[in-house]
Amino acid sequence: MSDQHASETAGSPVVANNNTVDAVVAALLFIVGIVVIVEARRLGSSWADDGPGAGYFPFYIGLILCISSLGIFYQSTVGKARDTDAFVDRIQLRRVLSVLLPAVVYVLGVRFLGLYVASAIYIALFMIVLGNYSRVKSVLLAVIVIAIFFMMFEVWFKVPLYKGTLAPLSFLGY
Amino acid sequence: MEEFSSLMQGFAVILTPMNIGLMFVGIILGVLIGVLPGLGGANGVAILLPLTFTMSPTSAIVMLSCIYWGALFGGAITSILFNIPGEPWSVATTFDGYPMAQRGKAGQALTAAFTSSFVGAFVAVVMITFLAPLVAKFALKFGAPEFFAVYLLTFCSFVGMGKGSPFKILVSMALGFALAAVGMDTVTGQLRLTFGQSELMRGFDFLIAVIGLFGIGEILTSMEEGLQFSGKAARINPKVVWETWKELPKYWVTSVRSSLVGIWMGITPGGATPASFMSYGLAKKMSRNGTKFGTGEIEGVIAPETAAHAAGTSALLPMLALGIPGSPTAAVLLGGLLIWGLQPGPLLFVEQKDFVWGLIASMYLGNLVGLIVVLSTVPLFASILRIPFSIIAPVIIVICAIGAYTVHSAMLDIWFMLGFGVVGYVFKKLNYPLAPLVLALVLGDKAEDSFRQAMLVSQGDLMIMWANPLVGSITTLALLMLLWPLISKALAVIRPPKKKEFAEEQPVD
């Protein structure tokens, strides 16, 4: 990030506290544990004719997951030592999302444009929008970086990368 | 001196121009990874792993292990010059390294850090050379119950030796095992936890998890801080190096102690990060200059760096001799071995002599090459950190995406990587340790197999875990580790504990 974002975050409104997030995550993990247990029961978590069933081991894993997440849930809601520090404040959340959301769009772009083209566009846009670089500089750098990757993977190490459903680079012959 | 002649043979295997070249490439890439935020030893090796698929296993492991040494060296550069630990295990190096740099002694601090890294690694490699064959020979007698007991011990040690809530360690571990179970069951051929999705049949590859958890997760956490690097200039010239080297032998006690701490924490899955903190703490307590620690004491740089490198290196011993990695990076290297068709474990020492001794020989050479490379190129690497984050961040995300794709040439894996990235970010902020998750994901299938085999032998009787003194003592030790948080609480009631130092500064890793 460029300099103006590096300002103090103190005083920015807190979006969530650690113990709240802790409790939510524990609840989610509990659900995962339940899913694992149900699936393990379906597969056969007991002793089959020829030995332990396919769900024998996962059943206990699910059980550990459930019990431990209950423990965390308890610690974060009623526990004395619960951590009420800020998990994330509004400025921090905006910064994190400013990386995460474009990344999601980027992966979506990879699906259609392939790794090379999508990556070049992603790097260039990231620099222009979040880094306030000039368009020429950003595009030039993105193209150079991707050209290096292209040479490295397709030409030198012969590891073909994803070209996308639209395959915009098919004219290169790789 | 059978080990010695084997080692010489190993040197003969790796001393080809090709392998030496790969060694330099590996070290330079490794230092680069260590310096860049978001890329660390584990995910750096994971991303570069697919590039080695076409090489011979020996060349591949030489390059990958050198990346690992490079990353271990690289972490110190950012800690000392920028006060930003490039890797979790170099957090303790910032305590005294950065104050030294502020006082204009960056050159001395860097030289001390690199040299003690080398010393720590060297002691650990000597230990591996002589101990690993013994452990492997011993482990040849292991059956399924013994192996499961060792797996159990590995995971229970996380609980016993980890910091923070034991519940979180358990959850992280269980989540890893659950993810490992996804896909086809190796014994019965049934599909597990796929919910009818054919894409999930392949299961979750731990390389994807490593790239997401450590790479993307790290970028998101760095982003939150709104990183702005401001570093101290580093000038290293032969004179500074020589002056520092003359001073270092004075601190041999610290070096020996730190090496031992590192080796112990590396073999047991404590890892490099706790080793560096523990060693720093011990040095502070035992040194005559203990009170001056934190103001730029050279001993405060030597202690954590020696221990971190010793631990990072010894983590490879259980990986080689037992097939059980001691750290996430060792786990990634183990994944590499499997891909090249080598089965890590005791048999490796019998069947793949060239490979094993080539690797051990490359540890000696790689660390020496590393020392030379970092001492001569510090200013270059320091300048990388002056590249603005808005250029580095997208490039690293692109590198992660490419790395995730190349593992199986599967588009879906890039989505998984992103998902793991969010999990990594949240887990990191909530102090969930990530190492147990990764190790459980790697070892999940094997641990389950050995458990089921043991149960088959005994027809479901758990007492097989105490069937003979060997397996019984390992299992008992494991359970002790698992219950350690409770035991230590009980002890605390009987006898009030001593004041903890650095407890709040210690990250969970």
Image (tube, rainbow, N blue to C red):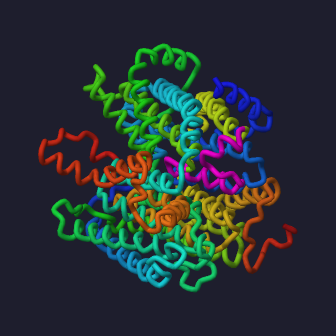
Q: Residue at x 41, y 15 (%)?
A: B250
Asked where in the image residue B74 lies, by quadrant, the reply is top right
Q: Position of residue B404 (x, y in %)?
A: 63, 64
- Magenta-highlighted residues: B324-353
Instruction: Using the image, determine if residue B439 lies above or below residue B494.
Output: below
Q: Nearer the viewer, residue A90 or B125?
A: B125
Q: Is residue A69 left or right of residue B377?
A: left
Asked where in the image residue B429 lies, by quadrant, the reply is bottom left
Give the total number of marks visible in the rendering: 0
Asked where in the image residue A77 lies, by quadrant, the reply is bottom left
Residue B178 visible? The answer is yes
- In reply to whether residue B341 is colored magenta, the answer given is yes
Q: Is residue B435 left or right of residue B60?
A: left
Q: Position of residue B304 (x, y in %)?
A: 41, 34
- In reply to whether residue B425 is colored magenta, the answer given is no
Q: Residue at x 76, y 30 (%)?
A: B12
Q: Residue at x 41, y 69 (%)?
A: A61
Q: Position of residue B165 (x, y in %)?
A: 29, 58
